């Protein structure tokens, strides 16, 4: 019987997967209204990807995340940011097994139209 744990195999994670995990994790935190817009480019030379308010940089199997958020009115900015950082870090670690170097939060605006 073949021992599959000893195969010399590799798993590759597309940067779009990291963008999606980060975006959905951030949006699931109470108080986050939506992502602020951001540039939509991919630079494969340095493994950096941007999309819909998320910037990802991957270096040596470590993920660095920048999130550009719009926060709902009446939510504490610091507490909401801390919750987003924790949730995104945990999601990346648990879902893809990569280390997280940092999760930077950039609050771009306050949504005064939301009524929660």
Image: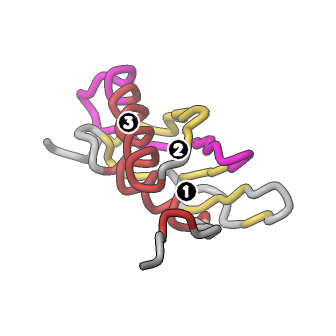
Q: Residue 104 vs residue 22: left or right?
A: right
Foreground tag (3 vs 2)? 3
Q: Residue at x 55, y 52 (%)?
A: 54
- Badge 2, how many Cα within 10 Å: few under 14, some, many 20+? many
Residue 66, percent across and down?
Answer: 59, 42
Q: CA distance from mark 2 to mark 1?
A: 7 Å
**Residue 43 x, y percent position in the rendering:** 79, 63
**Which of the numbered marks, if any, corresponds to residue 84?**
3
Q: Residue at x 23, y 40 (%)?
A: 30
What's the residue at 64%, 59% (across, down)? Answer: 50
The residue singled out by tag 1 in the image is 37
Frontmost of labels 3 and 1 is: 3
Q: Which residues are magenta?
A: 58-80
Q: Earlier in the sequence, mark 2 or mark 1?
A: 1
Task: Using the image, determine if residue 66 lies above or below residue 104.
Answer: below
- SS class of the residue under badge 2? strand
> Does the magenta run of residues contain 65?
yes
**Circle 3 Cα neighbour tier, 10 Å, few/some/many (<14 / 14–19 / ≥20):** many
Residue farthest toward the front in the current orientation of the protein: 1
Marks 3 and 1, how far apart in space?
17 Å
Q: Assign a secondary structure to mark 3.
A: helix
Q: Would you say the residues marked 3 and 1 are in contact, meaning their CB atoms lie under 8 Å apart?
A: no
Determine contact: label 2, label 1, CB under 8 Å.
Answer: yes
Q: Earlier in the sequence, mark 3 or mark 1?
A: 1
Residue to which mark 2 is pinned: 68
- Residue 88, image quadrant: top left
- Coordinates of residue 38 in the picture (x, y in percent): 61, 56
Query: As rendered, which of 77 and 101 lies closer to the eye?
Result: 101
Q: Tell whether 22 sits left or right of 87.
A: right
Q: Residues within 10 Å of mark 1 (few under 14, many from 20)?
A: some
């Amino acid at each position: 019987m073949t021992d599959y744990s000893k195969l010399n195999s590799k798993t590759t994670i597309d940067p779009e997967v990291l963008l999606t995990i980060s975006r959905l994790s951030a949006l699931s935190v109470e108080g986050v209204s939506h992502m602020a817009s951001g540039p939509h480019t991919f630079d494969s030379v340095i493994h950096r990807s941007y999309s819909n308010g998320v910037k990802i940089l991957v270096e040596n199997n470590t993920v660095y995340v920048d999130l550009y958020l719009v926060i709902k009115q009446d939510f504490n900015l610091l507490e909401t940011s801390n919750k987003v950082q924790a949730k995104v870090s945990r999601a990346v670690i648990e879902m893809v097994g990569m280390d997280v170097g940092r999760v930077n939060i950039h609050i771009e605006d306050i949504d005064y139209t939301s009524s929660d």
